Amino acid sequence: MAFTLYSLLQAALLCVNAIAVLHEERFLKNIGWGTDQGIGGFGEEPGIKSQLMNLIRSVRTVMRGIGCLLAVPQLEGWKIPGPWGPCN
Amino acid sequence: MHPGGLVAAGTPRQRKWPSKRRTPVSQPGMADPHQLFDDTSSTQSRGYGAQRGPSSLGYPAASASPQAAFLADPVSNMAMAYGSSLAAQGKELVDKNIDRFIPVTKLKYYFAVDTMYVGKKLGLLFFPYLHQDWEVQYQQDTPVAPRFDVNAPDLYIPAMAFITYILVAGLALGTQDRFSPDLLGLQASSALAWLTLEVLAILLSLYLVTVNTDLTTIDLVAFLGYKYVGMIGGVLMGLLFGKIGYYLVLGWCCVSIFVFMIRTLRLKILADAAAEGIPVRGARNQLRMYLTMAVAAAQPLLMYWLTFHLVR
């Protein structure tokens, strides 16, 4: 067991960080997921791939500002009071 | 404080409150369809205080006599008046701001249930095979409150089932001599974490598949919370009849929840044409069908995962 809310928070933070550090030029462009590559106009429906690309771009934009603030408690090792779990 | 209040109350005062409580002007449920709860606010704050329950009946009466001498002092009088005005201001501020973070009025809709609805819904959760019409009734663009329509989602059953699941888990651990109080918190945290993960995963997939649906997050939490009922049933049977009983009842509840979720979500996620039973071909509808099946299939898996360690 031991799947607590705190570990969910940690996992979410790590996933968001993973998405945020994807490098635009070295990686995303090479697999065709760059931000300037996918927007196909106002077609009928976006499709999964362009939705994913949008999501990645928004996560990267948001993460650069607010997300870094959210990561500070984890990085500093602060203890947050609450029913998070034994490994808080 | 309260027992002392009851003793010092004296029966004449106590008898005054219940008579006030029995004469509120309550309207029948169907009179105003937008009204979620029966109107019991006809009497003023005194009547409201009377409905708090017998234990506090004696309290306001008791506080009058010992504080009579206290109130004669003008300074404390003023202090009490100031304190009560401050409390009223604070309450106003909280009421104004809490609606920004927690949609209280929307939440009230999910708790507008009555006993018949709860009974019927529980029956539906354990035996959804004979129910024909799964569509939620609407009234002037807003869905009807749960007490008028058995198909509407509610948060009462999931909340109660979650708490009961925690208690039953504690009971099960206790019968195996494995209980300790922090384990209860751990169970609660674990179940909540899985629920949050499920909600986030489903929201993400709904976003990726661009489903235009009126399925709100709270609706989703309500639907995902219905599996706790089956889990409670399974664990209780496991306590009474051992592993065989647990597997039988859990298997039955898993299949029921699977059918329930598919029939409910099909109307919400799939396009209207598909919901009427016509198998519409096309990549989009197929994807949505897979999404519905995946959500429904996750329920039995989670039901097993969250309970198998409780039954030995």
Image (cartoon, grey):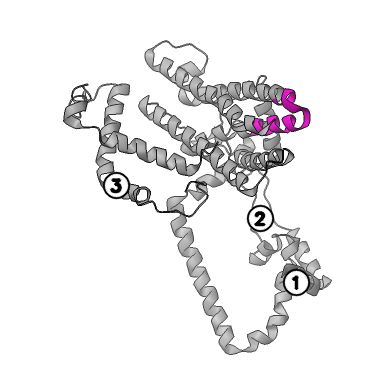
On the image, numbered disc 2 is attached to which residue? Answer: B40
Q: Position of residue A1 (x, y in %)?
A: 55, 36
Residue drawn at the location 55% of the way across and 79% of the way down: B81
On the image, numbered disc 1 is attached to which residue? Answer: B5
Q: Which residues are magenta?
A: B229-246
Question: The disc numbered 3 marks a residue on which chain?
Answer: A
Name the quarter where the N terminus of chain B is drawn: bottom right
Q: Position of residue A28 (x, y in %)?
A: 21, 27
Residue B140 seen: no
Q: Is residue B39 above or below residue B162?
A: below
Of the image marks 1 and 2, the number of the one nearer the N terminus: 1
What is the three-letter code of the residue carrying label 1? Gly
Q: Position of residue B41 (x, y in %)?
A: 64, 58
Q: Main secondary structure of the magenta part?
A: helix
Q: Position of residue B114 (x, y in %)?
A: 68, 41
What is the three-letter code of the residue carrying label 2? Thr
